[in-house]
Structures are given as structure tokens and as C-alpha cells.
Image (cartoon, rainbow, N blue to C red):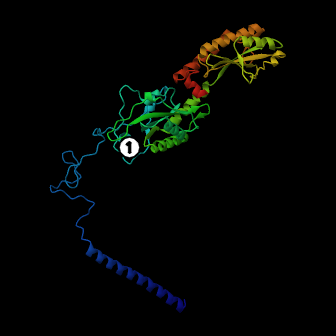
Amino acid sequence: MTDLQGALIVLGVLAVAAVAIYNYWQERQFRRKSEKVLPPADRDVLLPEAPADGMPASEPRDGVPSEPDGSSRREPSLGERAMADERVEPRLVGSLDPGVPEASEVPLHAMPVDDTPAAGGLERPSGRRPEARVEGRSDPASALEGPAGLWYPVVFRLPAVADGAALAVIRSEVSGEARLSDWLDPDVLAAGDAVPGEAPTVDRILRIQAVDPRGPASAAELQAFLANAHGAASAVGGLATAPDPAATAGHAAALHEFCSSVDVAIGLNVAAASGGFSGTKLRGLIEAAGFRALPDHTYVLADDTGTTLCTLTDGNGGGLDPQAMRSQSVRAISLLLDVPRTPGTVAQFERMVSQARQFAQGLSGSVVDDSGRVLDEASIGRIRAQLASMLKAMRARGIEPGDPVARRIFG
């Protein structure tokens, strides 16, 4: 080590010692000035003073908690009607699906309006009392027909002045065209509480279809609808609540799986014994039976409302061109009954069986299955039993083939 290096080390040590001494001196000067300005603290201000009788301030006196100044403290209550040791959660009711937990078991999610939570975890505008159900009116959720998982109902508490245009804007902002949605009839809903000094309110339900022919809504999709509802309600000074998105998505997935299992068509084929059917004669029989041709050359039998009851195609599921049939022969035709979309399914099945037999008789053919085997009465009976079992399962879930609920689900 050279002399220069040694000198530098000594200078460094002296510089550090000088800084430490200067900091210590500044600290002492600051402490002295503080003691002159601030009075000394006799006790810790965060700890309550002990009362004269020696009882700790934190202990209740005669069952009433006391404040540090000795005065009795009264716990705040909501509307002077708070019940001790009881928490009332807002819920939806009315599940129609056997084996699936009632919707009333799913807590509602509330839109934050202020920083003061009300009873049951439902946040309401400041000063508003809990919901009171109007006598003689049903619970809003009970008006949601159909099985559990079909609807995602968003309950809006809105100013009574909200008109149809405002409702249309809210519906567009919440779900848009992503899912079918509509406002429930207001006659089945309860009026909001009349709070002195506040504008009157009404409850409205926007029901969003969570299951349709495209499939079930996911939890993320429903969560997005709920977030949109929060913003739309807040914009007009209202409140929005809805069931748990994850629970509804689970019910929707289960409903979609079941509906996929019953989304079937029953087919009966009428095949020629040899060669094929005369196109001209076949067309005459088809039109005489009440079938009409669609633009794709599929023939349909419809009721007075236009609902399709039975579909007729060629043996391969293709169309039958009315003009081409004049010069062509047809080897087979197929009659199809769409189970979930056809009203009066049992009666229509019997009608289809009768019609297939009439075609077979008029064309000298046979009623066969897809494998070409002749369908005798025993075979028809087995199909009839399978259909009855399918209908029983659908009705157990609140789905009647061909009704408005079924048309919403199956298209």
C-alpha cells in the first residue's frame, strides 16, 4: 500500500465521522425546539382514560357499550327495525328445475350507489329503507317462465319517470344484440318504497336469455351484462341487482346439455318396392295431404298459425322439385317430426304415422326405418315409448314442445 492510498483511507474515515456527528447535532437541535413548542404528553391519546370507578372503558355497563367520555353508545340501526343476530339476504325465487338448487339460494349482486351498505349486503341510495313487497303482487322472479338457467334476470329500481325510451336505451346498453332480452310486464312487479323527500321509484326486470340455439352464456358474458347494468342504472339514478353470474352460467350449461339430448327429429321413410314412385302421382298425394313446397323444395305441413308440424323430403333429406317431379321417379320419401319444436307432439306423431301408411298404400310402397327395415306396429310402439319418455323429461324441466319457451331455446 502506498502513502497516497493510506492518506485517502484516513480522509474517508474522517469524512464519515464528520457527517455522523453533524447529523447527531442537528437531531438534538430539532428535539429541543420541539419540546419548547409542544407540551409533554401525559398519556397515549389512542388509549381511553380509565373511568373513576376503575372499570375499563371497553367493558359494557348494564349491557350498553360506553364511549370513552362515559356516555352510553347506541348502535346504528336501519329504519329503526334492525334485528340482532339476523341477516336477511335479498334473493330470487322460483326455480322450476327438479334437482337444481332454487334460485332463492343464490345471493343477489348489488350495484354500489354510496359507501353505506344496507342490510343483507345490498347497497342502496343513502336514506332509503329496505324493499317492502306490495300486498297482492307476486315476486318478480316468479314471472320468469321456463327452466332454471334459461333467464338471467336483472332487477332495476328506477325513477318512476323513466319512460319507454329510457328503458330501450338501458336494454341496448346492457345486452345489445349479444343475447335476446326484453322487459318483463310491469304489472307483475312491486312498486318501490315511497320515501319522504325522494322521488318515487318502480321495479323493472330485464330478462336476458342465457340459453339459445347458439349455446349457453358463460359466466364472463353474464358478468359483463351485470357490469353494463350497473352503469346504465347509475346513469339514471337507479339501482341494479342480479343473481350470481357463475351460478346462472352453471344452470345454463346444464340446461343446454339437456336440451341437446332431446333436440331430435323422428323420421319415417316410405320406400318403393322396386324402381321408384311416379313423380306426378307422388306430387298429387303430397299436395292432397296438405303439404306445401318451400323455396328450397322441402315440403311442410303447417297449422293455422304457420307452425311446422311435419316436414317431407326425398329419401336422402333433399328437396323435391315440384316441376322436376313431372318427369322423374322418386325412390323414397322421408317424413320428419321435430320433437322440441312441434306443439301437440304426440298427436302429430300419430298423424305422421297415419300419413306415412297412406302414402305407402297409395304408392304401393312400405314404411321403413333408415336401415330399410319395415316398421311394423311393434316397432312403431317402441318409437312411441321413447317419445313419451323424452316428453316427460322435458316437461319435468318446464319445457313444453312447441310453446314459447321451447321456441326461445330451440329456435
Q: Quadrant of residue 36?
A: bottom left
Where residue 276 appears, x then y in whole percent? 82, 14
Where residue 66 appears, x then y in whole percent? 22, 50
Reading the image, the residue beneath label 1 is 125
Residue found 22% across the figure and 55% down from its top:
68
| Residue 77 to residue 317: above or below | below
* Near-viewer residue (152 or 127): 127
| Residue 166 to residue 14: above or below | above
Dot 1 amino acid type: Pro
| Residue 248 to residue 372: above or below | below
Where residue 31 appears, x then y in whole percent? 31, 76
Q: If the image is split into quadrants, where does the C terminus sit?
A: top right
Where residue 324 appears, x then y in whole percent? 82, 19
Q: Is residue 59 left or right of residue 260?
A: left
Q: Quadrant of residue 201?
A: top left
Q: Is residue 321 left or right of residue 215?
A: right
Q: If the image is split into quadrants, where does the N terminus sit?
A: bottom right
Crowding near pointer 1: few (<14 within 10 Å), some, many (20+)?
some
| Residue 294 to residue 113: above or below | above
Residue 321 visible, this angle = yes
* Near-viewer residue (365 or 279): 279
